Every structure is written in C-alpha cells, then in structure tokens.
Image: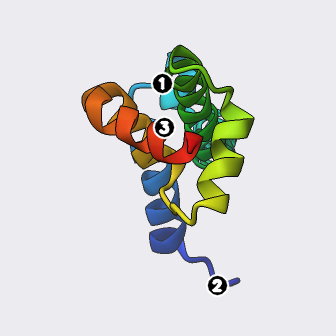
Amino acid sequence: MRARSPVTSRKRKKKVLEQAKGYWGRRSTNYRRAAETVRRAHAYAYNHRRRKKREFRSLWITRLNAAARERGIPYREFICRLKEENIFLSRNVLALIASENPEVFDKIVDAVKK
C-alpha cells in the first residue's frame, strides 16, 4: 500500500479554504477554485503593497506642487532650491507641513526663495 498523508493534505486544504472565506460562490467552498483565487489574491496584494508607495509619493508631489504654486514657485524649482539650501525634508513631511501648518511652510518657501 502506498503512503498517503491525509492529515497534511487536509491541513493544506483547510488553510486555503480558511483564506478564501467570504469569497463568492464556489470560490469559498471548492478547493481548486479557492486555491487559484487565493493565489491570485496574494499576487495582487504583493504588487499593490509596492504600488501604494508610488501612489502616495505621487499624492505628496501633487499637494506640494499646489502649495508651492500658491506661494509663487513651481514644484521642480522648489525641490531644486531645497537641495541647494541643504534642507533635507521628505516629500511626505513637506506635504504634511503644507496642509497642517501653512505658516511654517511659508517660512520654508521664504528660506528657499532668498
């Protein structure tokens, strides 16, 4: 008689079906359908964790551009002058300052404009 491992395979299938809980139709109950859906879901999750970083950077740049243009300086010039003045703040922090503390952002822009 060949060696089978029903305990191991049952555990593996149970794990996949647990992850597929809440999926629509057979995707939540049929192992084969659930396995391919869970595999795809993991691939999307992996890719989107990386995409999220890009999207947030893009959002910060958009906000900074709007805030800088209100003060009479375009974004690319603002960033270039920040580097020349050795002001090393991330785009995230600059966008936060621009939205939450406009007076502080005004001081940064004034320091850059000189």
Q: Earlier in the sequence, mark 1 or mark 2?
A: 2
- Determine if residue 65 is in view: yes
**Residue 43, percent across and down?**
68, 47
Which residue is under mark 3?
A: 109
Which residue is under mark 2?
A: 3
Which residue is under mark 1?
A: 23
Colouring method of the image: rainbow
Distance between mark 3 and mark 2 Cα atoms: 73 Å
Question: Front-most of 52 and 56?
Answer: 56
Q: Nearer the viewer, mark 1 or mark 2?
A: 1
Amino acid at the residue labelled 1: Tyr
**Image quadrant containing the N terminus:** bottom right
Horizontal side, residue 6 vs residue 48: left or right? left
Q: Is residue 68 above or below residue 70?
A: below
Question: Front-most of 12 and 82?
Answer: 82
Q: Earlier in the sequence, mark 3 or mark 2?
A: 2
Residue at the front extreme of this rendering:
114
Amino acid at the residue labelled 2: Ala
Task: Count how many numbered circles sit on residues in the image.
Answer: 3
Residue at (57%, 33%) from the top-left corner? 30
Q: Secondary structure at mark 1?
A: loop
Q: Nearer the viewer, mark 3 or mark 1?
A: 3
